[in-house]
Image (spheres, helix red, strand yellow):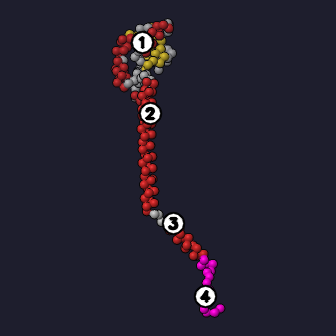
Amino acid sequence: MQGDEAIVGLTLTELALNILFGSVLLISLHRVPDQATELAALRKQHEDDVLRHEKDTQLLTQTSAALEALKKEREDLRSSMKPSCGEARYGRRKFVFAATVVDGTTYAVDGISYSYPRLLKRFRSDLDEGVRLGCVPRVKVSWKGGIDLKNFNSGLQRLNQEFYTVVISPGDEQ
C-alpha cells in the first residue's frame, strides 16, 4: 500500500463501541423530559386527584347518611329486656336469694316466711341497685311439696314482676 492511501474502516470492536455510545446518547436524549410536558402531566394528574377526592367525599357522605338511616330504622328492634344483674359485667352475685313458694302469697327464704310485700322490703336494696345499674336481680324459685300448680304459678308471677326467676326443683337451692 502506498502512503497516500488511507484505510477507512472500523474494526468490529470500534463499530460495537460506536453503536453502544450512540444508543446511550439516544436513550438519554429521549429521557430528558420537556418541562412544559412534565408540568402539563402534573396538572392533569392533580385535576384527576381532585375529581377523585370529590367523588370519594360524596360517596362517603352518602354512605354515612345511609348508615345513619339504617341505625334509626333498627333502633326499635333492640330488646327492651334488661340484662340480669348476675352477668359478669355487673360484678354482682349470680342469684340474690333462693325462695320456696309456700302458697300463692307466701315465700320462704332461708327458713323465714315472707309475704310478697315483706319480701320486696327485705330485698329492696338489691332491687334499687338493679335500677341503678340498669339490670334485674335473679332469684332461684322452688315449690313446697303439696302446693297446687295454680298457687305456685301465682307466686311465681308475683316474683317475675320484680326479679328474673329460675325455677329449680325443691332441695336444689344450693
Answer whether residue 111 is visible to the viewer in this image: no
Between the C-alphas of marks 4 and 1, the distance is: 127 Å
Report which residue position mark 4 lands on: 6
On residue 158, the disc is 1
- Is label 4 in a helix, a strand or a loop? loop
Report which residue position mark 3 lands on: 30
Mark earlier in primary sequence (2, 1): 2
Mark earlier in primary sequence (1, 3): 3
Where residue 88 appears, as percent x and y from the top left, is 43, 29
- Is label 2 in a helix, a strand or a loop? helix
Between the C-alphas of marks 2 and 1, the distance is: 45 Å
Inspect the image, locate mark 1, and give the three-letter code of the amino acid beneath it: Arg
Report which residue position mark 2 lands on: 66
* Residue sitting at the far right: 1
Inspect the image, locate mark 3, and give the three-letter code of the amino acid beneath it: His
Read off the magenta span: 1-15
